[in-house]
Image (spheres, rainbow, N blue to C red):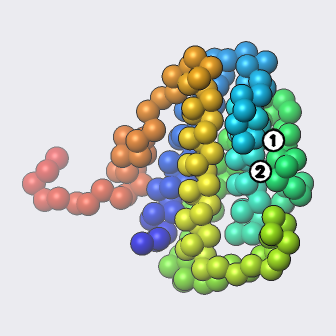
């Protein structure tokens, strides 16, 4: 189930996958990153902007971050410049990892209350559920960006969690006597 360790692992996975995806997208010219490829958010750049927008939106609810400008339809234009988007992504990932390191079982057991601009209503959901959505949202849109980058001719790095995240560094590997 959702635990502080799981959140730390998913935050680390999010950061590393974003580094890998942005490294792949760096190999494309800016025009290719901005080309409308028929995806939900249009382009590679637009999809990555929406992903950052969503992370900022959820972190504004979880941790009091400054919310992004309102409106999912505007999210693909959150940051127009590639270098600025890369920097904003790296900053957000560091913030998400630092925040995840502070989570407790008690906090996770609570309820999150927020106003949804998308559905125009007050919402309430267990924090563990909204955190699961938060991390799934990242994976979903990174998957879209991965496909778009691949279709543009660049092969992004591996995405399999056990080989991406340093589980030992996170203290998440079980101790097994006799193994070195």
Specify the label residue 90 is tagged with.
none
Q: Quadrant of the N terminus?
A: bottom left
List x then y, in percent, for residue 56. Answer: 75, 56
**Crowding near the residue tagged with mark 2, few <14, some 14–19, many ≥20 C-alpha atoms within 10 Å:** many
Q: Does residue 119 sit above or below 74 in this rendering?
A: below
Q: Does residue 180 sit above or below 64 in this rendering?
A: above
Q: Nearer the viewer, residue 134 or 64?
A: 134
As helix, strand or loop, the secondary structure at mark 2 comes to: helix
**Crowding near the residue tagged with mark 1, few <14, some 14–19, many ≥20 C-alpha atoms within 10 Å:** many
List x then y, in percent, for residue 3. Answer: 46, 71
As helix, strand or loop, the secondary structure at mark 1 comes to: helix
Image position of 6 (left or right of 134): left
For marks 1 and 2, the one nearer the N-term is: 2
Q: Does residue 72 sit above or below 84 in this rendering?
A: below
Residue lying at the far front in this picture: please name it.
Answer: 38
Any part of residue 58 in sight: yes
Image position of 96 (left or right of 105): right
Q: Residue at x 89, y 57 (%)?
A: 70
Q: Nearer the viewer, residue 157 or 86?
A: 157
The residue wearing badge 2 is 53
Q: How many marks?
A: 2
Any part of residue 86 in sight: no
Image position of 67 (left or right of 162): right
Q: Residue at x 62, y 60 (%)?
A: 134
In whole angstroms, how far apart are the C-alphas of marks 1 and 2? Answer: 8 Å
List x then y, in percent, for residue 57. Answer: 77, 60
The residue wearing badge 1 is 76
List x then y, in percent, for residue 113. Answer: 74, 80
Q: Residue at x 77, y 76 (%)?
A: 114
């Amino acid at each position: 189930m959702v635990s502080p360790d799981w959140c730390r692992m998913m935050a680390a996975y999010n950061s590393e996958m974003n580094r890998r995806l942005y490294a792949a997208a760096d190999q494309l010219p800016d025009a290719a990153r901005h080309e409308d490829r028929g995806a939900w958010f249009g382009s590679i750049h637009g999809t990555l902007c929406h992903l950052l927008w969503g992370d900022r939106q959820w972190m504004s609810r979880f941790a009091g971050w400054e919310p992004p400008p309102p409106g999912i339809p505007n999210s693909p234009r959150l940051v127009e410049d590639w270098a600025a988007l890369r920097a904003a992504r790296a900053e957000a990932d560091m913030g998400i990892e630092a925040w995840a390191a502070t989570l407790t079982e008690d906090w996770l057991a609570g309820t999150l209350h927020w106003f949804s601009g998308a559905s125009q209503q007050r919402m309430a959901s267990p924090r563990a559920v909204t955190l699961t959505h938060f991390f799934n949202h990242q994976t979903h849109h990174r998957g879209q960006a991965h496909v778009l980058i691949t279709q543009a001719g660049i092969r992004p790095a591996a995405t399999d969690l056990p080989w991406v995240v340093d589980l030992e560094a996170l203290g998440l590997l079980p101790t097994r006597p006799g193994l070195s």
